[in-house]
Each structure stands twice: as C-alpha cells, then as structure tokens.
Image (cartoon, rainbow, N blue to C red):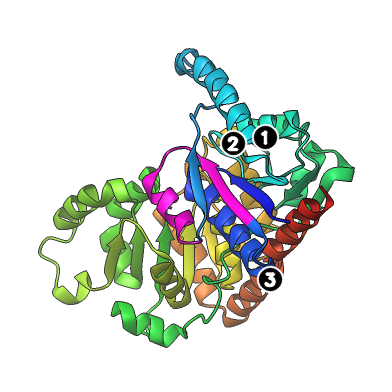
Amino acid sequence: MIRRIVFTGGGTGGHIYPLLAVLEEVIKKSSDDILVYYIGPKNDSVFNMVRKYHVRPYPVISSKLRRYVSPLTILDIPKFFFSLVQMLWRMYLLMPDVVFSKGGPGSFPVIFAAWFYMIPVIIHESDSVPSLNAKLSKFFAKRIAISFEHAAQYFPEKKIALTGNPVRSSLVRDIPKKEAAREYFGFNINNPLLVILGGSQGATPINEFIFSHLKELLLKYQLFHQVGEVNEDEALSAIGSVLQGESDQTKKRYQYAGFLNEMMMKKILAAADIVISRAGSSAIYEIAAFGKPSILVPLPRSAGNHQLVNAYEYEKSGSTVVIEETNLTLNLLTQEIDSILENPERIKEMGERGRAFFKPDASELIADEILKLSKAV
C-alpha cells in the first residue's frame, strides 16, 4: 500500500532548511512505499531543491497572517480565501496520509484542508514565541514539535514534544578541520576570525555597523561577512570607500558573500573563532551544532519579539553573549569578543555547551512521528 505524505512550509530559509532536513530523514527511513509532495509559495529555487529528492512540488496562493494593522491585509484577505479553496481541492486530489508543516506563508490553508479531510497534521515551531500561523495551526494539529522550552506554554501539553530545530545532516557531517577551512578561504590560521551571519536576506543594521567600523575591526581581527543576496552591490561600494588606500594585506583580512550554500556554510563555520549573528532559530542551532562561541544581536522588530526571546533562551546554556541592537557599539562588541578570545577555557566551555544544546536527533524524531502517523491511517 502506497503512503502519501505532504510537506508544507515556505518563506525564508528558516522554514525551508529545517523542512528539508526532516524530508531527508523521512526518505532515508522509509521504503519505496511512500509518495512525498511539497506544497508552498511558488519559488523556483525552493521547488528545484525539493525536486532533487524526487518530490513533486505544488504551488499555493500565498497570503500573510499579520499581527498588526496594514493596508496589505485588504489584499491578502481574498487571497487567503482563494488559497483555502485551492487547498481543499488539492488535498482532495492528493488525499495524503499525513501532513507535516514547517509554517510560513501559505502553510495554514494546507493545514486547514488536511483537518477538514481528517488527515493528521504535525507542525514544527522553530522559535520561542510562536508565529500567529502556529498559534492558529495548533487547533488543527495532532502533534506539535518545538525547538525551545519557552514555546511549550503556547501549546496544549499533551500535543507537544521538545525536539530542537532540525538541521540538515549533510551540514554537520564530515566537518573540516579549522586549519583546512581557513586555508580554503585564504585566512591566516594565527589571527582570530569573526564570522558575521545575516542570513540570505542580510541584516542591514549589522551590515552598516560593520562597514562603519571596518577599519578598526580589521586592525584586530579577520572578518567573513554574509551581507545578504540583495546587498552585494552595496557591500562592494561600501568596502571600496572604506578600504581605499589600505594595503592588500589589510584587504585580505575581509571577505564577504551574499548567499552561502551548504558547502560554504560548513567551511566558514568550521573556520570561525566567534560567530556574530541574528537570533533566528536555524542560525542558533547551526552555530550550536558546530560548537562555536557566538554573539547574538537579535532583530528588534521580529514578530512577537521572538528573536530576543530566542537569544536569551540560548544564552541560558552559556554558549553565547547577547547584545541588543540598541546597545551595539564598537567598544562593547570588541570588549565581548576579546573577553572570549583571551580565555581558552571559556572558548572550550562555550563550544561544549553549544553542542549540548544542539539536538542532533531532531529530524529523526519528527520523521519517526510522521511515518508512525502515516501507518496509523
């Protein structure tokens, strides 16, 4: 008997990459008796990713559930109802045995349609403060996986399991040695390397902070800076003006990239001494998986202030230092960096606590539950 499984989720890499991690595990654990589908907002890049797993993608009309008043809501209301009708029809045609949702735009209509046809739903909430989507989806879900203990208070106790955030197994497998990773990028093994992660969309305030203090930072550290795909031209211009007249040796101490594929992310995290990052769940768990000391600068305008809560939840583990954006100054940042770099025992302890916080079996636990529910139907 062929079992059918639908994965849904979309938006940023914070939704897509954990979804792919679970999808990988489901395929690895199952025999040839399953068919897997993906439903999400039309995105050629994401659709091509899932096709690599021989998964057929279907588009859903995407609308955003907002916590705030916006004129865009007027446009999204009819789109939302169209997507409900669209997914009622799609679910009727596919009639899966189970649905797994990673959240994000377009996922709620899939969940609602599954509930309408009495198809079991599993959802995963990455952040400490659930999205509005997750708060609505909990009424239609049979099981709920969470990444942070803080999120448990928002969901029915009998439905939840603390699994951590799924990370692609290929990212944390065969991690290169620091020396080899440094050599790949051309960084000096003897000088401290800071890795600044802003995600595929970048973090404009952090970018501007780094550019404005680049000369001072390069006197003490080497920097690798993920600026975001849309910010590469801006970065090139800023660097040209800031580093004009500097020696080639100084310029080699700074590198940047817009997007980091899996191979690049693996190498740069392996090469890092300290990671400076926003506080999205995926970023936190990837940093933890590599056992890297970090400094988190949460996005102050994140929905429900979830990045701030994520950051302080992770800080409890002893793996990171939190600097809120309003307090971010060159003196404070370099003081925190140096207090870590000058204490080898602290570096070791922060790394060990990070690895302990990371839950390497998150994908496996969720995949097991998906396959169990698919057999129960």
Q: What residue type is labelled 1?
A: Ile
Q: In which quarter of the image is the N terminus?
A: bottom right
Rendered position, 256 above or below 109: below
Q: Nearer the viewer, residue 299 or 169?
A: 169
Q: Which of marks 3 and 1 is nearer the N terminus?
A: 1
Residues rendered magenta in the picture: 35-53
Structural crowding at the residue carrying mark 3, measured as other residues with C-alpha within 10 Å and reported as few (<14), some (14–19) or many (≥20): many
Instruction: Kindly state the secondary structure of the residue where label 1 is placed.
Output: helix
Taking the image as shown, residue 210 lies to the left or right of residue 360, namely left
Q: Looking at this rendering, what residue extends furthest in the left direction?
A: 245
Q: Which of 149 and 348 is in front in this view?
A: 149
Q: Quadrant of residue 261?
A: bottom left
Q: Which residue is drawn at 57% across and 82% down?
A: 344
- As for residue 162 lying within the magenta part, the answer is no
103 and 23: which is toward the camera: 23
x and y, in percent, of residue 42 in the image: 42, 38
Foreground of the two, 87 or 13: 87
- How far separated are the C-alphas under marks 1 and 2? 6 Å
User: Dot 3 corresponds to which residue?
Assistant: 353
- Residue 154 numbered mark, or none: none
Disc assigned to residue 107: 2
